[in-house]
Every structure is written in C-alpha cells, then in structure tokens.
Amino acid sequence: MKKQRIIIIGGGSTGLSTAINLAKFNENEIIVLEKSFVGSGQTGQCCGFVRTFYNKKEMAFSAFKSNQEIKRISKQNNDIEYIKKGLLVINSLKNKNLLMENIKMLRSLGIKAEYLENKQLNKINPYIKTENSYAGFDPEAGYVNSRLVVDYLKNQCENLGVKIIENTKVLNIRLKKKIFYIRTNKGELKAAKVFNATAAYSNKINSFFDFQLPIKIVKTNNCFYRLPMGPQRFTTAIADFVNLFYIIPHKEFIDVSSLTVDLKKQVNPEDKNIYRLDENASKQYLNIISKRIKNAEKSSLLGGFGSCIDISPDYYPILGKIDEVPNFYCATGFSGTGFKHFPMIGILMAETILEKKPTYPNLVSYFNYKRFEKEKEKERKKVTDSYFVKK
Ligand SMILES: Cc1cc2nc3c(=O)[nH]c(=O)nc-3n(C[C@H](O)[C@H](O)[C@H](O)COP(=O)(O)OP(=O)(O)OC[C@H]3O[C@@H](n4cnc5c(N)ncnc54)[C@H](O)[C@@H]3O)c2cc1C
C-alpha cells in the first residue's frame, strides 16, 4: 500500500498520543508540527491530575481506561511517578441524590467510588470544615508530572518513526484536489490528511476552511499556597461544589484553582497577558478555601500563573472527523480535563483517521461535534461541569 502523509498540528498530549497510535499501524508517514516546543501548550501547564469521577459513563469509562494506561506508563518509567492522593468531590446535602446516582454509575463500570457522610470526611482529612456537606470519594485519583509524560510520548513517537518538527507554526492551509497545502513559517508541506490537535487554538486552524466548532476560550488562574502548621499535612485533592474551588495538594504547597468559569469573558490564547496570574485571584481563592479548610486564611502565597482552557457547550471533548472538510479531523473542547484522557483520545483519533473499525464505537459517536445539532441531545447542553448534572 502506498504511504500517505498525515500531518498533526499541535504537539501536546492529544497530538503526540494520536501520532503514536497512528504510527503503530506503520502504514503512513506521520508528521507532528508544533509552533513552539512539544508540551508548550496546556499539556505542559496542566496539573496532570487523573480522576475517574465524572457524571457521564462515557467520560468515566474513557478516564478509567486511560488511568490504567497512565499507571502502566508510570510503572515502566521510574521517573514518571503516579502520586496517589484520592479526590473528595464535595457538595451540599440538597444534591445528595445526584451524587448517589453518579457513584452507582461509576461502580457499574468497576470504578472504586465511595460515598462519604460529613463525619467520614474528617477521617480522610481532619482539616476540612464539613457542615452540611458530604462527598464522593475517588480513592485512586492522583497526578503525574505532565512534562515528563510529554518526554515519554515524544520518545515513543521518535522510536516509531514519527517526525516531530518544532518551532513550526501553521499559518494557512488550502485544500486543492484532495491535497492539503500547509503553509508554515518554514515553508510549505503537503498532506493527504490533517489532524487539528491545537485545543485552544483549534478554531484558528478551522477558520482556514471557514469552519468553526462551538468552543469558548477562557482564562484560568492557579495559585500556590503554603498552608499553616497542621493543615500542611493536607493530603487529599478536593473538588468543592459548594465553594467552587479545586485543590491539588503537593508536598510543599497546595495548588488552587476555580471551578467556575465566566463564559462571557473570552480570551485569545495568543495574548501573552493571560499567562500572568490575575492580581485579585490570590486573595479571592484564599477567602474561598478558608471556608472549607481550617486555618487556611493563615496561608502564605507562593506564586501562581494564568492560562486558558477550551470549553465545549457540554464540558465534554469534541473529537472526530469534520464532515464539512474531507480528510480533516479535530480534537478540542477539553474543558480543562483533557490530559487524563490522552491514551483513549490517541486510540479514538487514530482509528478515526485511518478509518479502522472502532474499538469503542459508543465513544466515537458520543464525542462527535454533530451532537450539538441534534434535538434529543439538548439535555447535554445544560451541563455546567463534568462532575454533576444540575437539575
Ligand atoms: C492550568 C491548567 C491545568 C490543567 N489541569 C489538568 C489536569 O490536572 N488534568 C487534566 O486531565 N487536564 C488538565 N488540564 C487540561 C489539559 O491540560 C488539556 O485538556 C490537554 O493538555 C490538552 O492537550 P492538547 O494536546 O489537546 O492541547 P495543548 O497541550 O494545548 O497542545 C496544543 C499545541 O498546539 C500548538 N499549536 C497551536 N497553534 C499552532 C499552529 N498554528 N501551528 C503549530 N502548532 C500550534 C500549541 O503550541 C500547543 O503546544 C489543565 C489545563 C490547564 C490550562
């Protein structure tokens, strides 16, 4: 069979994982074009947190399978440590039924999710204020260093013959007689198929074909605090849906971000200012976490950073073939939770691009962008996060 050239734009976890899965079939020439260096986008900025606690079985299943692969990678590579923390998903008592439904669904997939009454919360973490709260517990949740994972993925790509071309920005694409002409800052390349794996930048690439996906790019802030004596032993990650914050504990500090996003305030990922921490965020976050963690108000700020994420209308990724442009594919709308799915995304996208029989056909249809056009899928548009469906 004649080898085709497939070009992947974007060298993050999505692009690299897909490149590996494409190259395993050894049928095509695979090239990854990255405007800066691999992992320079959200993948390198992300917390590398891995959870299986989701409100939809498709997301939970994808995370569960991916988690197994991430743990396998960690076992085989001494430097990529999987740091198990456990995740408490806290909500107020009035939403208890939603949580119970979620836990039932997660358990049906073999995920070890637990339900905790407020007194039990303090057994997991004595520094949590538990009034009127209860939690779901995802005991296997933890994190890996995403930059080390990128090194691993890059290495795998190179071993499989994938060409990774860094510092090469795609400036324009034309499609003529089934050939893509890709103009970059270093010259033109031709390809038979193109995969747009640029996440927050995806609509910039889609615009070359007068096509847009329904995603919004919003700014995020991450603040690092050193907790005072006592709470510094804080060991569990928290997604708090009462006070709307997220905490990932590290050895010397906690990493705090918000669970709310203002979809009206969209940003341009190319604007360098968004990568700076907003001045008011560090005070705001300290106030919020003090409502949940005893003595947190005495913490000291160690620093932080700003970034941006790509939000889809239902907070689930958009993955697949773009029908309007032949042989063009896109993955975006990860809504701040795309890294942990990279093993599954790699399989789904590679099989779609190569038109192979899908291993997970349900997921292929679930993540397709056409879902937003279907009347029966309107329910999914009401989602405001990927943990709970608010009724
Ligand atoms: C602060 C933060 C924390 C996060 N924490 C977590 C977490 O704990 N767990 C989790 O699962 N997810 C997390 N996420 C989300 C996760 O990081 C992303 O969903 C995931 O990494 C997306 O990977 P990607 O490869 O699709 O995109 P990216 O990693 O953003 O890669 C896209 C690449 O495309 C390149 N590119 C863009 N335009 C062009 C062009 N014209 N030409 C060539 N290259 C181009 C960019 O330089 C970039 O490297 C977090 C995100 C942020 C911002």
Image: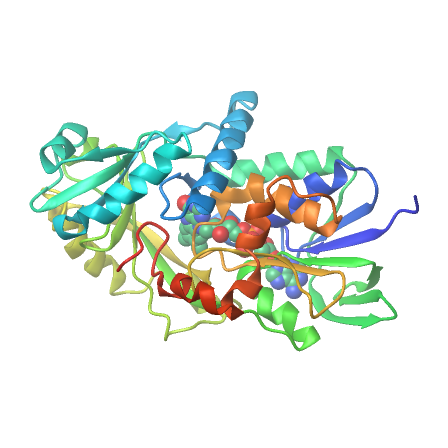
Question: Would you say 124 lies left or right of 78 here?
Answer: left
Question: Would you say 192 lies left or right of 157 here?
Answer: right
* Display coloring: rainbow
Q: Which residue is the extreme one toward the front?
A: 376
- The percent coordinates of residue 60 (x first, y second) are 43, 42
Which corner quadrant of the image does residue 383 belong to?
Answer: bottom left
Question: Would you say 277 lies left or right of 216 here?
Answer: left
User: Split into 4 quadrants, where in the image is the C terminus?
Assistant: bottom left
- The percent coordinates of residue 33 (x first, y second) are 71, 55
Q: Nearer the viewer, residue 76 or 164?
A: 76
Residue at left offset 66%, top offset 78%: 210
Which corner quadrant of the image does residue 194 belong to?
Answer: bottom right
Q: Is residue 311 above or below residue 19?
A: below
- The percent coordinates of residue 173 (x first, y second) are 75, 70
Q: Is residue 102 above or below residue 67?
A: below
Q: Nearer the viewer, residue 241 or 152?
A: 241
Question: Would you say 218 lies left or right of 190 here?
Answer: left
Residue at left offset 62%, top offset 45%: 348
Q: Nearer the viewer, residue 336 or 285?
A: 336
- The percent coordinates of residue 273 (x first, y second) are 43, 68
Q: Which residue is the extreme one toward the left?
A: 131
